């Protein structure tokens, strides 16, 4: 793996902007999936705006339409194909460029389906070739040739990609790419490759610049942040300590750590640095050791509870959020009750709940004893009811307190309201 600069692509940005000069072009982007994908989309927006396009919020008003896809859940596929179907006539009438990128494009069966059923796309790019988007766009604009730019091998890390951030107060910074864990339900290691960490000097430089630009909150991103390896023994805890020293940054969050890698030095760094928010995302996935083993999570229910207890003893003000998958293959009523038991014990501040969906190419897809849909939904509803029943009790600790909040902007639902977060949300 090499750390490369963006000079070659900057040349393509210049070439495309020359072609687009004085054309008042518009682009639309739809982002599916996680915060890592959102961060990738901010990079795409940064490149696209430098090439002469202005963002619009409707695909059918755009000259360039980009779908940055995710393949973690099945419904994302339905969403992509539904959107593409709706664009068929618009594409024929206007000649708009349709570009499809992200995790889903790394999957061979998706590429085949697109070629057969939705052949009017112009560019397919994968997770390892996002940085080449200006070159791909140049090819379609100058030669009118369709481009499929997907590679299977792990990508290099590019520094210096332009970025157009959604917010002016909080920013996500990707610190590492890929994942080595191969949880049996997860497609990420197959589509995003093995773990590659950015150099800590580059990360700190980016965050220092963000602080100078007025950003107050930073979220460090990676599929497995606590296995960050900055080289020469520089670990995730070192990064947390160094980011905390950057003047102007007031809050630091990170997502996602893996419970198996949550080491004492990381707990100490969280305790010692008041800027690090004391809500920790600790993905549980299941409370049953039997299911955790089948998931290849490499910890048991007891390991998880012991870790949470250890963190809470060292940092009493800490609260937890988590991810839970309901209905993993072979999950029995007893297994599910173990999950409810952990929820009852920890009383998570936030729970991101998912109904297990089969992903082609993962070991779990081939497992026997897939749980029937109605049982998955029934368990999901029971989990949801339990989590909701804990909200009043969880919120009681804030009664009569004064909380410092970071105002993030107008509420999406009511323009007269502002949205904000305290340190525990
Ligand atoms: S840790 Fe597991 S769930 Fe998370 S990205 Fe890696 S393989 Fe997927």
Image (spheres, grey):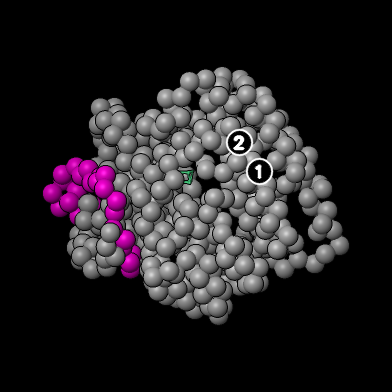
Question: Horizontal and vertical percent for residue 164?
Answer: 42, 63
**Quadrant of residue 196 within the rendered picture:** bottom left
Mark 1 residue CB less than 8 A from any atom of ligand 1: no
Q: Secondary structure under badge 1?
A: helix
Question: Horizontal and vertical percent for residue 157?
Answer: 31, 61
Q: Secondary structure under badge 2?
A: helix
**Quadrant of residue 51 within the rendered picture:** bottom left
User: Is 323 placed left or right of 396 in the picture?
Assistant: left
Who's the residue at 53% across and 62% down the image? Answer: 219
* Residue contact at pointers 1 and 2, CB within 8 angstroms: yes
According to the image, label 2 marks what residue? 289
Above or below: residue 174 compared with residue 59: below
According to the image, label 1 marks what residue? 302
Who's the residue at 62% across and 59% down the image? Answer: 410
* Label 2 Cα crowd, 10 Å radius (few <14 / some 14-19 / many 20+): many
The residue closer to the viewer here, 292 or 421, is: 292
Span colored in magenta:
137-161
């Amino acid at each position: 793996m090499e750390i490369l600069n963006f000079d070659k692509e900057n040349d393509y940005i210049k070439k495309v902007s020359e072609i687009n000069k004085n054309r008042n072009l518009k682009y639309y982007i739809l982002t599916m999936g996680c915060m890592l994908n959102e961060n990738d989309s901010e990079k795409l927006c940064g490149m696209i705006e430098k090439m002469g396009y202005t963002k619009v919020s409707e695909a059918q008003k755009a000259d360039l339409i980009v779908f940055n896809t995710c393949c973690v859940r099945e419904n994302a596929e339905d969403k992509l194909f539904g959107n593409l179907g709706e664009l068929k006539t618009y594409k024929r009438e206007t000649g708009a460029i349709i570009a499809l990128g992200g995790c889903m494009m790394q999957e061979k069966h998706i590429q085949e389906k697109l070629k057969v059923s939705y052949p009017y796309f112009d560019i397919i790019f994968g997770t390892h070739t996002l940085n080449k988007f200006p070159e791909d766009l140049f090819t379609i604009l100058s030669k009118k040739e369709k481009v499929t730019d997907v590679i299977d091998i792990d990508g290099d890390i590019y520094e210096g990609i332009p970025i157009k951030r959604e917010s002016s107060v909080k920013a996500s910074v990707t610190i590492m790419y890929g994942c080595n864990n191969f949880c049996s339900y997860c497609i990420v290691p197959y589509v995003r490759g093995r773990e590659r960490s950015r150099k800590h000097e580059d990360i700190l430089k980016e965050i220092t610049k963000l602080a100078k630009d007025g950003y107050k909150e930073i979220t460090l991103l990676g599929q497995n942040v606590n296995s960050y390896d900055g080289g020469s023994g520089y670990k995730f805890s070192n990064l947390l300590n160094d980011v905390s020293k950057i003047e102007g940054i007031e809050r630091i969050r990170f997502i996602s750590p893996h419970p198996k890698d949550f080491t004492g030095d990381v707990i100490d760094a969280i305790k010692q640095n008041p800027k690090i928010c004391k809500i920790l995302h600790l993905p549980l996935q299941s409370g049953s050791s039997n299911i955790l083993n089948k998931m290849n999570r490499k910890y048991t229910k007891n390991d998880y509870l012991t870790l949470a207890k250890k963190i809470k003893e060292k940092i009493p003000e800490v609260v937890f959020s988590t991810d839970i998958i309901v209905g993993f293959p072979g999950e029995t009523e007893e297994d599910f009750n173990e999950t409810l038991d952990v929820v009852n014990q920890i009383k998570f501040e936030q729970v991101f709940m998912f109904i297990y969906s089969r992903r082609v190419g993962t070991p779990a897809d081939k497992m026997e004893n897939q749980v029937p849909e109605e049982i998955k939904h029934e368990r999901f509803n029971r989990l949801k009811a339990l989590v909701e029943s804990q909200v009043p009790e969880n919120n009681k600790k804030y009664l009569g307190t004064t909380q410092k909040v970071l105002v993030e902007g107008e509420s999406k639902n009511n323009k007269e309201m502002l949205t904000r977060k305290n340190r525990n949300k």
